[in-house]
Image: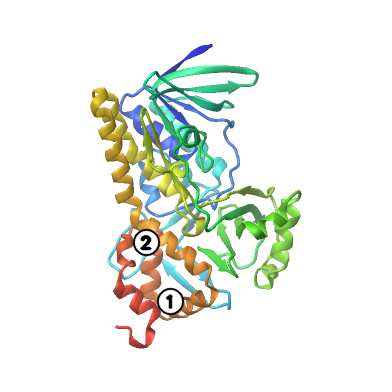
Amino acid sequence: MTARGADVIVVGGGPAGAATAWALATNGIETLVVDRARFPRAKPCAEYLSPQATRMVHEMGALAELEGDGVAKLAGMRLFSRSGVSFEGRFVGEHGFHAYADHGLAVRRERLDLALLNRARAAGAMVLEESVVQDIVRDAAGRACGVVVRRGEVVDEMRSNFVVGADGLRSVVARRLGLARRFRWPERFAFVSHYRGIEGIGDCGEMHLFDGEYCGLADVGDGVTNVAIVLPSSAARGASGDPDAFFESWLAAHPTLARRFTRAERVSPVLTTGPFAARSHAAFAAGAALVGDAADFYDPFTGEGIYAALRGGELLAPYLIESLRATPARAHEALEAYDRARRHEFGGKWQMERLMALAVAQPSLMDHVAVRLRERRDLSDLLVGVAGDFIPAGEVLNFRFAFQLLAPSFAV
């Protein structure tokens, strides 16, 4: 059976899909969002929005709602090395750069995703929940022209002029179009839960580094803290069958963290996601494009996921509209331009993510870096500003920054 679709079908209703759908619907494009979940729904995520991500949330009209009660404002980040040395960087610094806001936000995904999806609805997008996309429909020339959707026991083909894959790390759209690619290193998995009553939670997010592993803590409002543990696949196998017990056992085995959880209560199940380190061969195919984690997700250390999702949707929309309005011969050119724009927009951050992954795998190096950044608040503020998405990555991806960071005896 073939059901009516829309000009554009967006697969996935998370931040990437909602931002894309909102931008398209705002420009008069008939848009349908299809998602397997019913919103609100939980999602394994650090739940962090960088200062620059709030700009797009504001433009979508959801910022005032999200900044109300039950949301935490983060002033920066604090990192603890394996040896216990810590440094802090804040978004407001002496580096001369200014973000859209002077703080990041930490918001439960149940609340964030519903707010953004509702803004897409308000702009005119249709939303189909509890619907699983199983395949891509193609025309005689091999161009994507719809999706195969299962709702309960009913399977339909839904037709469209364009398909957007915003369906996350294991994107069905990317796999069906032959665009998916996975790196062999670093192959990590994340375990995420929430606790109430952790001691010493302040106005900064925290990152605790161990031997090839790390744990992030961030206040998400109402006295609740997001706790995310990221482990290599070899260690993550121990969670098989009982991730809740594995999670609590891992915390107990790390004394610097365990003592802060003495009076804490876990208030949500442990959710898992991974493996990471995935990137598409290209972020487009004939009649289709990828956005957010469906296009690439290397490692969650820098907390780029939600920003990249929102910015990716914002970036894709004008190129998609151009492709829809172009002749068949020129439609491909707009998608190629989108792919180039993505690489230009995120290329510096991709380099930074790889360098951070290498650093996490070298605890002695991170010990040295932490000592240096504790001494040089200007460098730590700059680094955190890059992670906050308002300082260009080139400000730290250069010889001068590396020289000051790694050779303190000769730093200028």
Type of the residue with mark 2: Val
In this rendering, does residue 298 appear at all? yes
Q: Which numbered disc, 1 or 2, marks the residue that appears first in the sequence?
A: 1
Q: Tally the numbered discs.
A: 2
Point 72% across, 51% down: residue: 243
Residue 386, labelled with which disc? 2
> In this rendering, would 231 be left or right of 66?
right
Location of residue 256 in the rendering, given as x and y in whole percent from the top left corner: 65, 72
Look at mark 1 in the image and give the residue it sits on.
373
Give SS at disc 1: helix
Location of residue 70 in the rendering, given as x and y in whole percent from the top left corner: 55, 49
Image quadrant for the C terminus?
Answer: bottom left
Q: In this view, does 118 lie above or below 386?
A: above
Q: Is residue 22 above or below residue 111?
A: above
In this rendering, does residue 196 appear at all? no
Image quadrant for the N terminus?
Answer: top right
Give whichever of 24, 232 is nearer the camera. 232
Type of the residue with mark 1: Leu
* Colouring of the image: rainbow
Q: Looking at the rendering, which quadrant does residue 391 occupy?
A: bottom left
Give whichever of 113, 329 is nearer the camera. 329
How far is mark 1 from mark 2, CA to CA? Answer: 15 Å
Query: Label 2: few (<14), some or many (≥20) within 10 Å?
Result: many
Residue 267, labelled with which disc? none
Point 55% across, 27% down: residue: 134
> In this rendering, would 128 be left or right of 408?
right
Give whichever of 334, 202 is nearer the camera. 334
